[in-house]
Amino acid sequence: MVIPYLRFLMLGLFIVCAGMLAFAVFYLEGVLGLEACPLCMSQRVFFAACGVFGLLAFLHNPGLLGLRIYALLIALSGALGAALAGRHLWLQSLPPELAPACGPSLAYMLEAFPLSEALQLMLMGDGNCSETVWRFLGISIPGWSMIAFIAIILFALASLFQRSR
């Protein structure tokens, strides 16, 4: 059985990830009318994965080994998401003349290309990803994503090294 507060921290991770996804869909897209670029969509997948693993850890209430497995899965998902956020930040830092050309929309890629090719194009990003369309406190969306992924990784690593009581 997991240390009780860790179980509820896992539920908190799920709630935070669900809240971030809801913010992206309902506020950034719905209210501000921003369209998510391929790298934004890819990062959302990893936020969802972190949240789902947190929810599963809460519902399953595993022993110490199970907690470590969930924490490892959360850390891995967070690290992959952070890598994508890092690429996104790098694309945004490029001068406009060095930014890659804008590609087709995500819907078109999924419709026109085989899934493996569409995923590869999605993970690479394009010119749409190099635009900074929104900032909060001077930090762009992928910057906030990077901060969130780092916090998730630190939480997962702290959970990974917990000892049983």
Image (spheres, helix red, strand yellow):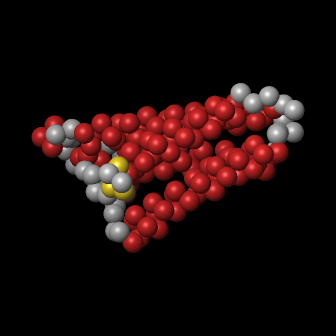
* Residue extending furthest toward the bottom: 31
Q: Quadrant of residue 107?
A: bottom left
Q: Where is residue 133 shown, x and y percent of the image?
A: 28, 57
Vertically, is 121 above or below 128? Answer: above
- Number of labels in the image equals 0
Above or below 130: residue 153: above
Examine the image and state in which quarter residue 19 appears. Answer: bottom right
Is residue 114 among the parts visible in the rendering? no
Quarter of the picture holding the N terminus: top right
Residue 16 image-quadrant placement: bottom right
Give the residue at x 51% y 34%.
79
Where residue 114 sits in the image (x, y, percent)?
A: 40, 44
Question: Which residue is depicted at the point 25% across and 39% down?
Answer: 93
> At 82% from the left edge and 40% from the top edge, which residue is drawn?
3
Q: Position of residue 106 (x, y in %)?
A: 36, 54
Q: Is residue 152 left or right of residue 163?
A: left
Viewer-proximal residue among 159 and 56 = 159
Residue 115 screen position, x and y as percent = 44, 44
Q: Image point 16% across, 40% down: which residue?
A: 95
Is 54 positioned to the left or the right of 36 in the image? right
Asked if residue 114 lies left or right of residue 105, the reply is right
